[in-house]
Amino acid sequence: MSFTASALVLAFVAIALLALGLAGLLRQVSLLTQQLEGGAAAPRQGAGARTTRELVGFRLPGDLATDLVDPAARHTLLAFVSPGCSSCSLTLRALALDPEVADGSVALTLVSAGSCAPALRDAEGAGRLRCLPQGRTAMDRLAVPATPYLALLDASGTLRAALLPEEDTDLGGWLRQADTTLHQAGARPSTREDGPS
């Protein structure tokens, strides 16, 4: 085989390997994009949920529901926060200004990884406000990925929506969209009972 022929074969092999590598990379990017957009979930490795969004539709167990759900409110918004978290403070201040939270039709229950004092100050103005201090166990049971994190519960303690807010998230818009979804879902009960353990 001449030098030119062997160089040509080697070039074709290199191009084929690069094409296979690029195809694999594009497949991984596609899967990650689908997961980030709420599409196909990653393969389940264990029995527990890996994110709170996987728990949407599940009713909270009795002990968690007792601690977190405000039975006097139409809905309960859980805000998972950490002391010293600046984005948690911004989120709580924005939520306290929302008309539905301010008038108490949506109760705001804070689940703090530490002390409740900073979070209660930030959420001042909410009509129905309470806080669960040292709530790391509840965060773990509900697969909370980070703080701040929001979860909307209906009156029965069923998780109806979850959100990891960003700096530019329209929290009021998200609440109203989730509330609209709740009213539509109210006509057809589809609560799964085998919730988080």
Image (cartoon, rainbow, N blue to C red):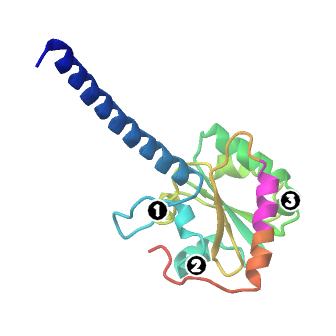
Percent x, y of residue 70: 71, 74
Reading the image, the residue beneath label 3 is 102
Reading the image, the residue beneath label 2 is 59
Reading the image, the residue beneath label 1 is 137
Q: Quadrant of residue 10?
A: top left
Outermost top residue:
3
Above or below, 131 relative to 4: below
For numbered disc 3, what is the local secondary structure?
A: helix
Give the mark nearest the N terminus, 3 or 1.
3
From the viewer's perspective, is 30 left or right of 157?
A: left
The residues tagged by marks 1 and 2 sit, at their Cα atoms, a distance apart of 17 Å
Q: How would you rate the neighbour count of disc 1 (Cα within 10 Å): few for under 14, some for 14-19, many for 20 or more?
A: few
The residues tagged by marks 3 and 2 sit, at their Cα atoms, a distance apart of 26 Å
Name the residue at 61% across, 40% down: 85
Percent x, y of residue 29: 47, 43
Q: Main secondary structure of the magenta part?
A: helix
Depth order, front residue of 96/28: 28
Is residue 85 visible from the viewing direction of this image?
A: yes
Instruction: Please state the extent of the stretch shown in magenta in the rendering.
Output: 170-179
From the viewer's perspective, is 74 left or right of 7?
A: right
